[in-house]
Image (cartoon, rainbow, N blue to C red):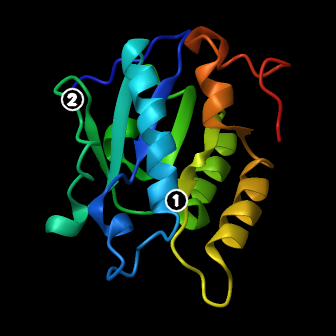
Amino acid sequence: MSLIQSRSAPVLVCLNLQRAYIDPADPCFAPRADTALIHAGACLAWARRQDLSVWHIHTSGDGPRFAPIPGFEPNPSEPVLRKRASSLFDSTDLARARPPLRYAIVLGFTAARDCLASAVDAERSGAQLVFVSDAIASSALTHHTPELVDSVLTALLGEWAVMVTTAELLRREPRLVPEFGGELEHH
């Protein structure tokens, strides 16, 4: 598998776009998944039209709950990287990428664990992440509404990464996304 990354363009990371997050009977179910997937689909289509590298990073596991969400299956040129823990940086394949991951636009599940862990690890490694706030969602947290959970987590992610909406992302040229000094502001 070849992990090709342009030095000037970001990689679109589709994080955990797996069936467990859309199944209401699954403990990983993200109540706002439907809304997040509408935006994730727009971002994925944009990245493919721009010929950006797209990497699908999935939590390792067997069975149908770990399969890609219908409509979000990787194209043949898009690698699927497996991770064992929360952070996207926990993928052995990602750790071997050359050049190392420097800039990424991230969407997917879940903000409460995987996105937050990835944001902290990115800061430690020197990678710059842009999270698409309306294209991420979290699994339910007891005693809190899904809207509150996602709102608070979006604010927390903004402490370590740049936050944009789908509309903001789609208005930009992909080569400008990594330029964080003024082109994209923390929300």
The mark total stands at: 2
Would residue 62 be seen by someone viewing this image from the given angle? no
Q: Earlier in the sequence, mark 1 or mark 2?
A: 2
Query: Where's the C terminus, which quadrant?
Result: top right
Query: In the rendered structure, are the residues bearing label 1 and label 2 in contact, judged by CB atoms less than 8 Å apart?
Result: no
What is the quadrant of residue 150 in the picture? bottom right
As rendered, which of 10 and 49 lies closer to the eye? 49
Counting from the top left corner in percent of width and height, residue 24 is at 36, 78
Give the camera-side residue of 120 and 62: 62
Q: Quadrant of residue 45?
A: top left
Within-10-Å neighbours for mark 1: few <14, some 14–19, many 20+: many
What residue type is disc 2 on? Asn
Q: Give above or below for 29 relative to 15.
A: below
User: In x, y percent, where is residue 73?
Assistant: 23, 41
User: Residue placed farthest to the bottom in the image?
Assistant: 143
Q: Position of residue 173 (x, y in %)?
A: 60, 10
Query: Residue type at mark 1?
Result: Asp
User: Which mark is drawn over residue 114?
Assistant: 1
Q: Residue at x 41, y 73 (%)?
A: 29
Looking at the image, can residue 46 be seen? yes
Q: Which residue is mark 2?
A: 75
Q: Nearer the viewer, mark 1 or mark 2?
A: 2
42 and 128: which one is in front? 42
The N terminus is located in which quarter? top left
Q: Local crowd at mark 2 within 10 Å, few (<14), some, or many (≥20)? A: few
Report the residue at 55% width, 52% height from top.
136
* C-alpha span from label 1 to label 2: 23 Å
